[in-house]
Amino acid sequence: MSTEAVEIVILGRPYKVSCPAGQQNALRAAAVQLSEKLVELRQRSRVTNNEQLAIMAALNYCHELCLEKEKNHQYSETMDKRIKLLQQTIEAALIEHGRYGDSSHEEPPLV
């Protein structure tokens, strides 16, 4: 996959970053989001050192990512359980259907 050098600006400072072809707009959007986060942190924390701000932003984003991964994991487990239940229900219906005939549309005998 080819890459392209893209210029982005973070906190008013330009950076040249290598980016996969077709991902330039996503990179620019991420740079804007990061700049906004850094400005917000600067105002909220009164930290003016850009390195400290960058570390705080990275920690915040990593924390958010961990929370989203956990939510995704829980969702995946819930879906796995639902799929297994659905499979069991289908298998039980197929077995029940097999008891009363495979293709006939007759009513099952009353027990």
Image: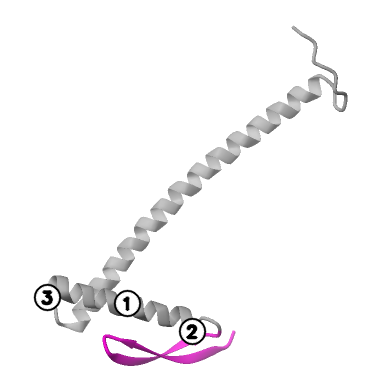
Label 1 secondary element: helix
The residue pinned by badge 2 equals 24
Crowd tier of the residue under label 2, counting other residues whose Cα lies within 10 Å: few below 14, some 14–19, many 20 or above = some
Can you say whether 19 is above or below 37 in the image? Answer: below
> Residue farthest to the left?
46
Distance between mark 3 and mark 1 Cα atoms: 17 Å
Vertical relation: 92 (above or below) 36: above
User: Which label number is shown at residue 46?
Assistant: 3
The magenta-colored residue range is 1-21
| Coordinates of residue 2 in the picture (x, y in percent) | 57, 88
Q: How crowded is mark 3: few (under 14 residues within 10 Å), some or many (20 or more)?
A: few
Kind of element beneath mark 2? helix
Left or right of residue 75: residue 82:
right
Residue for point 27% across, 74% down: 37
Q: In which quarter of the image is residue 16?
A: bottom left
Element at label 3: loop
